[in-house]
Amino acid sequence: MGFTAANRARELERQPDRAVLASALGQLKRCYPERVIPAPSDVLLTRWGVDPFSLGSYSYPAVGSTPAMREDLARRWNRMAFAGEAVSTSFPATLQGAYLSGIQAAKELLA
């Protein structure tokens, strides 16, 4: 998995998948010059900066925020349970946090 941010991410979002893949493989070869870097069997690219549902956003701890605030976001409300990286206190702003919070929310609803 790779993660690119800021201006470079905006540049890559405008490029075709093959160019982004070539850039990523080039970086791997630069980091591991003694290794043979095989081409991947498949590639999945996201372009969050132009995705109308996220616009490149994910949660971050603002100055003055506390883990309790994420717990408040995760608190069940009536018959609704909330999940996502923003409610994870252990793995905020990550796919792992979103996934694990989804499992927890499902368990709560099933109970």
Image: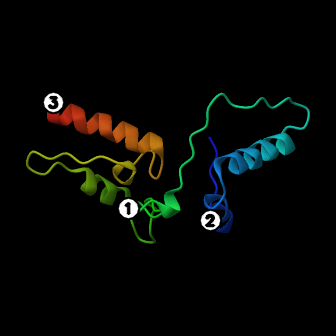
Check disc 1: other Cα within 10 Å, few if <14, some if 14-19, many if 20+.
few
Q: Secondary structure beneath disc 3?
A: helix
Sequence-wise, the earlier of marks 2 and 1 is 2
Q: Residue 6: x and y, percent?
A: 63, 66
Q: Residue at x 62, y 65 (%)?
A: 10
Sequence-wise, the earlier of marks 3 and 1 is 1
Residue type highlighted by circle 1: Thr
Q: Residue 5: x and y, percent?
A: 62, 61
Label number found at residue 10: 2
Circle 3 residue: 110
Residue type highlighted by circle 3: Leu
What colour-coding does the image apply?
rainbow
Report whether 97 appears left or right of 37.
left
- The residue sitting at the bottom extreme is 63
Q: Residue at x 43, y 60 (%)?
A: 59
Residue type highlighted by circle 2: Arg
Sequence-wise, the earlier of marks 2 and 3 is 2
Say if mark 3 contacts mark 1, CB within 8 Å: no
Circle 1 residue: 66
